[in-house]
Amino acid sequence: MYPTLVRDARFYEFQLETDRMLLAEARKEVCLICGDVLHSGNFRRKPRGGPAGMGEDADLRYSLCCADLECRTRHTPPSLRFLGRKVYLGAVVVIVSAMRHGASPARMRKLRELFGVSRRTVERWRIWWRTAFAESRCWREAAAKLIPPVELARLPASLLERFLGNEEERLILLLRLLGPMTGGASLQAL
Ligand SMILES: [Zn+2]
């Protein structure tokens, strides 16, 4: 089941490993502002809702910083774990939001308790899917290819259902699709 997957240490390791690869990719680039090289600029962030005891790196947001002392522009690569400035893991935001559709109030309460998410937070996420996400370029590009169209009111469940593969594969595909919204300039915007 999806909630178990979010708490699964092996799944978290996979996300961590993917984030390291995304960092390595970003390191090959130069500063978008001045063209200087990029240095390591990781910062501490403790994502909520994941498995416990995942070590030091689990609380690290991989990031880069321009080496030029006068520029120092931050370049934050995409992440499977951190969804912009949201305090919960991206996987928690996706799963709790998706399972909201068709869930009884009692089941929803259990789900919120499992991840320590308030009702208000779930409501904020609902609005986020319909606004920030629905207006994003990554969504519009994906949506253009989907026939019949994905039901906006049921995001992200309606999108998750359209991917092929098992639960884990679908969740990864959705987290990858969110990639452009997780770092870079959009990190400031969120
Ligand atoms: Zn620079």
Image (cartoon, helix red, strand yellow):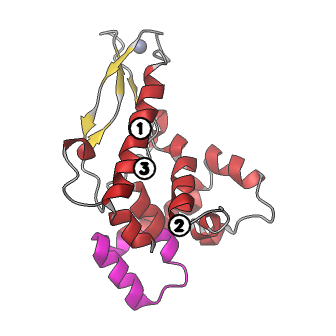
Q: In the image, what residue occupies the spot 62% across and 51% down?
A: 135
Find numbered disc 3 in the image and state the secondary structure of the residue it sits on: loop
The residue under label 3 is which amino acid type?
Leu
Compared with residue 21, is residue 13 higher up or lower down, i.e. above or below?
A: below
* Left or right: where 47 falls relative to 180: left
Q: Real-space Cα distance between discs 1 and 3?
A: 12 Å
The residue under label 2 is which amino acid type?
Glu
| For the residues bearing labels 3 and 2, Cβ distance under 8 angstroms | no
Query: Which residue is disc 2 drawn over?
Result: 167
Q: In the image, what residue occupies the spot 70% across and 46% down?
A: 141
Is 86 one of the magenta-colored residues?
no
Compared with residue 50, is residue 102 higher up or lower down, i.e. above or below?
A: below
Compared with residue 103, is residue 144 higher up or lower down, i.e. above or below?
A: above
Query: How many residues crowd around disc 2 within 10 Å: few (fewer than 14), some, or many (20 or more)?
Result: some
Give the x, y percent position of residue 178. 53, 49
Query: Which residue is disc 3 drawn over?
Result: 83
Query: How many residues crowd around disc 3 within 10 Å: few (fewer than 14), some, or many (20 or more)?
Result: many
Query: Which residue is disc 1 drawn over?
Result: 188
Give the x, y percent position of residue 68. 34, 9
